Image (tube, rainbow, N blue to C red):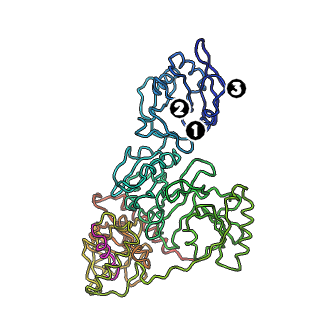
């Protein structure tokens, strides 16, 4: 039975439960629309939500009658008004707070609904949600409900970031290119009203269908501006094209740029049901529901092994009855797996075929989900199709109607006469210089994100290419080899430094093998730090199996990966000219020298960092020396 409160000469109020909230209105038949609105409001983990419909001109006596039907308890209350009270929402909240002795939160402004039952007050709608505590002044609470834990790390208004703008939206932020372009207000409205607010997850919508692609460097700067503890809450959303001009997915490039796993929503998050993620259309409009909700993109591996692939971390496919062997991959038969990919489900043999990257990288169909059978083996295809039909028959009728069965066949890679990163034998003179410049231009065409902020990106990148193509390599940080000849003239150190700064950062262990005589080794052991004027080269795979008597292990914090320029050497790391290294551990193991890279502004000595680097480098060396089975 609904609770009621009455009094002589005034309205009678009732309280009706709807969903996780309560509707407080005058007695009589409940308005179905008000009940439906109340039932759709998102749950509040800290407060009881009250949807209140006050008559015009409510005075203290009426508010007293209203207070009588407030559900009993000692916890906080959140007021949502069906129509703004004449005396103001905060005034009503203050009255109830003092009368009931409970904290009351109300909206000062006009709250706008967001998907999933949220309510948001933008700067143009009012100050936001206000908290009234008995006996204390009102204080701002938040702009969004549910109240986001991440709100303190989001700027209160638009701010510049390189060539981009970070603009707050209810679900998080919109990272878009600076400037004006068509339908800017339309896209802002879609991102304001079209994505559910999560208290736990910070949505970073990237790009716009109508403007240029935002700089990957700017996205990485935003990521790195966040406190490390907040980054796990970030979920990127490709609101503009997900593919960069070279065809790579933004998630893969961003993970490589920041050196950490990054998570991407599959589409616009609407709520908590099976249809709560909608595909982003080419014009930014919401499309069909997606059943793959979230993918994790992983940076290149620091240890030897196959290149990492994005995997589905969250999906709604009904595969719970199948054993999950790793995230997004379930066992369908003894030697057959079903893998959640962007385009749907992939029924494939185990282990994965060599064309797996093609299937995993395919984008979803705009019309419907697909269940694809691998056609790499003509003999196995009929069995895979039978297993796929059996799987689809186990789905609900509604899901079966959304699914299209098909096959995926490996396609041969396109032939390229001159792929980026591959160069002919080194040439000298003007002809060689022009050849390197042209390769730099092609690389920038494939990866325009590298050029961010660099006044002459082709020349800077060409300096790195010349360094990779065969400029003399020192034996170790701070030393030089004698008697070597360089097929190219040494690149200008300043230009080389600028070119390397365009490349992704590598954080973690690296190694190289050098030839050091006893005198040079004692020179290292007698110093706390050394500075290398050249671009020291190391590998993420550890010291190479080349002649030398000393393994130099270096913990990198700002070394640069060159795999984008040299796909044949994806493990190579170059340190900027002039990098300073600290000798750590002072290990007496013959043939071993350990260092860590320092950065400008770091204290001259930090024993804790030295010990941590030495410990991690020893662990890495032990890992590298394990026998491989």
Q: In this image, 371 relative to 307: left or right?
A: right
Decide if residue 412 is on the left or right side of residue 157: right
Q: Which residue is mark 2?
A: 80
Badge 1 element: loop
The residue mark sitting in front, 3 or 2, is 2
Location of residue 291 in the rendering, given as x and y in whole percent from the top left corner: 62, 57
**Range shown magenta:** 455-470
Marking on residue 56: none
Q: Residues within 10 Å of mark 2 (few under 14, many from 20)?
A: many
Q: Which residue is mark 3?
A: 1
* Spatial separation of the CA atoms under disc 2 and disc 1: 10 Å
If you read the primary sequence from the N terminus, does the residue marked by circle 2 or circle 1 appear first? 1
In the structure shown, which secondary structural element does the residue marked by tag 2 occupy?
A: strand
Q: Is residue 459 above or below residue 156?
A: below
As drawn, the label of residue 41 is 1
Q: Residue at x 65, y 73 (%)?
A: 374
Quick check: marks 2 and 1 in contact, CB under 8 Å?
Answer: yes
Is 197 placed above or below 340 here?
Answer: above
Which SS class for mark 3? Answer: loop
């Amino acid at each position: 039975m609904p609770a009621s409160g009455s009094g002589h000469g005034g309205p009678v109020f009732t309280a009706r439960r709807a969903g996780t909230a309560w509707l407080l209105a005058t007695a009589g038949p409940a308005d179905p629309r008000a009940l439906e609105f109340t039932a759709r409001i998102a749950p509040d983990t800290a407060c009881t939500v009250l949807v209140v419909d006050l008559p015009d001109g409510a005075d203290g006596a009426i508010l007293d009658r209203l207070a009588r039907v407030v559900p009993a308890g000692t916890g906080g209350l959140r007021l949502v008004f069906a129509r703004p009270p004449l005396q103001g929402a905060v005034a009503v909240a203050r009255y109830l707070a003092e009368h009931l002795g409970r904290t009351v939160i109300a909206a000062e402004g006009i709250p706008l609904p967001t998907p999933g039952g949220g309510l948001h007050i933008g700067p143009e709608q009012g100050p936001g949600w206000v908290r009234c505590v008995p006996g204390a002044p009102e204080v701002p609470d938040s702009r969004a409900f549910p109240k986001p834990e991440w709100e303190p790390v989001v700027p209160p208004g638009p701010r510049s970031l390189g060539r981009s703008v970070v603009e707050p939206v209810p679900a998080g932020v919109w990272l878009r290119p600076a400037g004006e372009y068509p339908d800017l207000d339309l896209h802002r409205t879609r991102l304001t009203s079209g994505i559910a607010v999560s208290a736990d997850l910070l949505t970073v919508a990237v790009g716009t269908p109508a403007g240029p692609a935002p700089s990957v460097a700017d996205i990485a700067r935003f990521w790195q501006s966040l406190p490390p503890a907040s980054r796990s809450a970030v979920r990127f959303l490709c609101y503009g094209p997900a593919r960069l001009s070279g065809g790579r997915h933004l998630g893969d490039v961003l993970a490589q740029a920041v050196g950490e796993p990054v998570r991407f929503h599959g589409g616009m998050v609407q709520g908590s049901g099976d249809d709560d993620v909608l595909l982003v259309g080419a014009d930014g409009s919401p499309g069909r529901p997606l059943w793959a909700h979230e993918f994790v993109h992983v940076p290149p591996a620091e240890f030897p092994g196959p290149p990492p692939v994005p995997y589905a971390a969250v999906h709604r496919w009904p595969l719970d009855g199948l054993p999950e062997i790793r995230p997004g991959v379930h066992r369908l038969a003894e030697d057959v797996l079903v893998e959640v990919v962007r385009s749907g489900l992939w029924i494939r043999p185990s282990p994965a075929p060599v064309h797996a990257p093609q299937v995993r990288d395919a984008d979803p169909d705009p019309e419907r989900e697909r269940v694809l059978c691998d056609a790499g083996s003509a003999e196995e295809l009929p069995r895979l199709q039978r297993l796929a039909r059996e799987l689809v028959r186990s789905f609900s009728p509604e899901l079966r109607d959304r699914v299209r069965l098909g096959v995926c066949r490996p396609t041969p890679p396109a032939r390229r006469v001159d792929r980026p990163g591959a160069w002919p034998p080194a040439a000298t003179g003007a002809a060689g210089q022009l050849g390197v410049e042209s390769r730099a231009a092609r690389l920038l065409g494939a990866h325009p994100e590298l050029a961010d902020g660099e006044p002459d990106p082709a020349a800077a990148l060409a300096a790195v290419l010349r360094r990779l193509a065969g400029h003399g390599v020192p034996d170790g940080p701070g030393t030089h080899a004698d008697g070597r000849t360089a097929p190219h003239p040494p690149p200008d150190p300043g230009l080389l430094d600028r070119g390397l700064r365009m490349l992704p950062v590598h954080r973690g262990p690296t190694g190289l093998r050098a030839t050091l005589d006893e005198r040079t080794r004692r020179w290292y052991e007698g110093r706390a730090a050394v500075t290398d004027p050249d671009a020291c080269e190391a590998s993420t795979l550890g010291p190479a199996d080349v002649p030398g008597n000393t393994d130099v292990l270096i913990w990198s914090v700002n070394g640069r990966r060159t795999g984008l320029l040299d796909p044949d050497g994806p493990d190579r790391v170059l340190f900027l000219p002039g990098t300073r290294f600290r000798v750590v551990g002072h290990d007496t193991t013959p043939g071993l020298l350990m260092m860590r890279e320092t950065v400008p502004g770091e204290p001259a000595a930090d024993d804790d960092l030295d010990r941590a680097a030495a410990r991690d480098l020893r662990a890495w060396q032990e890992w590298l020396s394990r026998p491989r089975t």
